[in-house]
Image (cartoon, grey):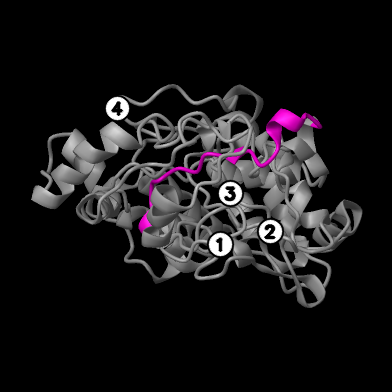
Amino acid sequence: MKIITAIIIVFIALAFGTSWVVAVNNTHAIKFVVPKGWPQPVYDFKQNPLTAEGFELGRKLFYDGRLSKDGNFACASCHQQFAAFTTYDHNLSHGFNNSFTRRNAPPLFNLAWQKEFMWDGGINHLDLQPLAPITDANEMAETIQNVLNKLKKDTAYRRMFKAAFGDENITTQRMTKAISQFVVMMVSANSKYDKVMRGEDSFNLPQRLGYEIFKRKCINCHTEPMFTDYSYRNAGLTTDDYLADIGRMKITNKPADSMKFKVPSLRNAAVTAPYGHDGRFVSLLSVMNFYRNDVVNYSTTDSLLKHGIPLSNFEIGQLTAFIYTLTDSSFLKDPRFAPPGFENRMPAPPAEHVH
């Protein structure tokens, strides 16, 4: 077991493209790399230093169904890697006891730059985020204490918590910090768009025209390089009669925040359908048709959208071509973020690269 663990740690260190050193508690530090030209992340790494051991523990937790009441729903159940860690082709995700989630699962990437989480910003720290789905009756439907009890009975988990944190003490804080170490490393910054910005590739004509249209008509809300400004906006949507979701107003109790939802990133948008907080839009075309035809002008509709967005069929075609350049295929297939054990099916790294 120790040999396998050591191999995994070496694989992680090599995969992250950084040399690693022994840190506190004999852990192996891994470096968070900010892509060139990007802003500094807001996540406080000093409060949760990244280590190969913590990352691997977080990955195991992320893919473990035992965090749910019946053992069937892991974090990965709603956040699937090939769909940029959202739920593929479902407007709402399946939860405990044949229930459904109340919102469309957001994709997971570039979380280090987010101050608030969920569609309404109801969670204000990444380390707290897992507690919501774990305890939600429509999702994992478990209690935190029951989760901790399950983990404490597992000798593998006791070893992994000791490796990551210095002793076998399994706590809520350590569990959520480990999950954060895993998901915070999910950086998506290697799409064709990124390669073009780095001078490694070039757009074809439809992609270039789409980028120009994007900069004229979309960039105020979907700001580069994150392709969101992380604001909350009322896009002129009608309220779903069944879900009755009022958006950020649920958090602030302010009528001015009625139907305001976080602006989603357009990165990997081509693989994250359906769209919207309730998944009502089945395709990119349906989103664009909404913005050009169906925006409702409420008192709280965002000022940029009160008259919709005028888009011709030609512009929609070019915009779609550009949005496809935001798909980061290397991120969608990155073995670091696959289920535990996946690296055992990868070729062994050359011996001279092992430090």
Task: Identify residue for label 4.
Answer: 36
Task: Identify residue for label 3.
Answer: 237
Identify residue type, mark 4.
Lys
Residue 121: where, in percent of width, then height?
67, 36
Answer yes or no: do the residues labelled 3 and 2 have beta carbons within 8 Å? Answer: no
Instruction: Identify the residue at image location x=13%, y=40%.
Output: 200
Label 3, label 2: how many angstroms apart (C-alpha)? Answer: 9 Å
Task: Find the magenta span and give its range.
Answer: 253-270
Residue 280's disc number:
1
Instruction: Identify the residue at image location x=73%, y=51%.
Output: 245
Q: Is residue 172 left or right of residue 15?
A: right
Identify residue type, mark 3.
Leu
Q: Nearer the viewer, residue 209 or 88?
A: 209
How crowded pointer 4 is (Cα within 10 Å; few <14, some 14-19, many 20+) is rated as few
Residue 167: where, in percent of width, then height?
77, 42
Secondary element under disc 2, as helix, strand or loop, is loop
Secondary element under disc 4, as helix, strand or loop, is loop
Mark 2 and mark 1 lie on one chain; the one further toward the N terminus is: 2
Residue 8: where, in percent of width, then height?
49, 56
How crowded pointer 1 is (Cα within 10 Å; few <14, some 14-19, many 20+) is rated as some
